[in-house]
């Protein structure tokens, strides 16, 4: 009897589950996705349409393992077709939550943290949502053309998607942007801020994940932040500030704000911590996969308990 119980416990733990039956992120799978996204023959920037298409195909293929509702949202820029990739879960629900991350990179670099980490988060969330029946429809969206030269233009994949929701009067509860979620540093003075005095409040170690929202961002962001922190999967801090503060809108949530949706960003704070930002040193070897997995787990738990 004791041996049977022991083997049951071991099998339970090896399956990667919480005590309440929810699957957890798998660092082996995370590493495989990061490898597929970053170790491509060409860099996945706006100039290399073939690399972008291969990345979009990869994301769609992974999404399709776990969702029966996966498709490209295509649009044309200067004669080239670019693609957002969308997977939906809980199609029986009318109200939806958007979780998004961009898959393109800046210039000629691998972009592991920026933003293969966020896309990998989407792929792992898709895997863990498989077989679940969420109370809200959850759309996972991988965007193209977030980076310059299209940042803050109507050609951003994020703009295209947010605009389509607004034009169709889709009932969107809110949006969550996964923007650089894999870099952590426990050293003193490894974390900086747009205003130096903020270090007195948030500390000077880059050892936490941040929930970033603008002031008066809506009920969704407040509730999401509260539930994410309650999930307690990783050290988490919340930051609210004016939209004009440098960095607060430097990601996919930007255009959801523009169309009146409640949205927030989950981030390791980008260039305020990670010196590899937009550099060739932004490789998967610089990431903390264990803590990245915990960030992803927090998103899943929050979505399933929203």
Image (spheres, rainbow, N blue to C red):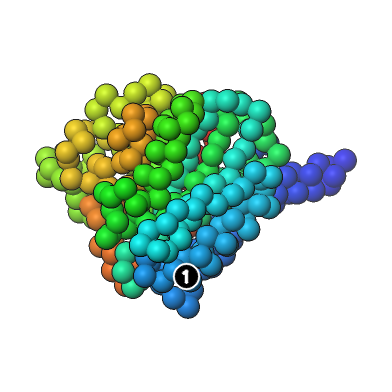
- Asked where in the image residue 255 lies, by quadrant, the reply is top left
Residue 247 appears at what percent x and percent y?
23, 46
Q: Residue at x 12, y 44 (%)?
A: 196
Outermost residue to the right: 1
Q: Residue at x 70, y 49 (%)?
A: 15
- Asked where in the image residue 197 lies, by quadrant, the reply is top left
Residue 78 appears at what percent x and percent y?
35, 62
Residue 202 appears at what percent x and percent y?
23, 39
Above or below, 79 against 11 in this view is below
- 86 or 288: which is nearer to us? 86
Q: Is residue 193 left or right of residue 56?
A: left
Give the structural element (helix, strand or loop) at label 1: helix
Q: Is residue 31 visible?
A: no
| Mark 1 lies on residue | 51
Q: Is residue 67 left or right of residue 277?
A: right
Residue 113 appears at what percent x and percent y?
38, 59
Q: Is residue 61 visible?
A: yes
Q: Residue at x 46, y 60 (%)?
A: 81
- 84 or 291: which is nearer to us? 84
């Amino acid at each position: 009897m004791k041996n049977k119980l022991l083997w049951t416990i071991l099998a339970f733990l090896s399956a990667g589950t919480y005590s309440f039956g929810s699957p957890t992120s798998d660092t082996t799978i995370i590493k495989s996705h990061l490898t597929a996204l970053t170790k491509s023959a060409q860099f996945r920037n706006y100039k290399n349409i073939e690399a972008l298409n291969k990345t979009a195909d990869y994301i769609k293929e992974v999404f399709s393992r776990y969702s029966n509702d996966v498709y490209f949202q295509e649009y044309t820029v200067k004669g080239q077709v670019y693609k957002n990739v969308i997977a939906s879960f809980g199609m029986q629900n009318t109200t939806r939550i958007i979780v998004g991350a961009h898959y393109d990179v800046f210039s000629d670099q691998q972009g592991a943290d920026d933003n293969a980490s966020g896309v990998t988060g989407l792929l792992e969330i898709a895997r863990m949502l498989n077989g679940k029946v969420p109370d809200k429809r959850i759309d996972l969206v991988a965007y193209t053309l977030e980076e310059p030269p299209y940042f803050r233009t109507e050609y951003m994949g994020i703009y295209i998607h947010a605009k389509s929701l607004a034009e169709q009067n889709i009932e969107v509860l809110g949006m969550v942007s996964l923007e650089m979620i894999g870099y952590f540093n426990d050293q003193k003075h490894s974390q900086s801020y747009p205003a130096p005095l903020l270090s007195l409040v948030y500390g000077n170690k880059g050892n936490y994940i941040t929930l970033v929202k603008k002031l008066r961002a809506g009920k969704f962001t407040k509730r999401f932040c509260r539930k994410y922190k309650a999930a307690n999967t990783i050290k988490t801090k919340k930051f609210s500030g004016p939209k004009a503060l440098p960095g607060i809108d430097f990601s996919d949530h930007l255009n959801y704000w523009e169309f009146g949706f409640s949205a927030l960003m989950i981030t390791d704070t980008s260039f305020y911590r990670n010196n590899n930002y937009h550099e060739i040193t932004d490789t998967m070897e610089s990431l903390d996969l264990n803590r990245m997995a915990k960030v992803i787990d927090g998103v899943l738990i929050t979505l399933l308990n929203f």
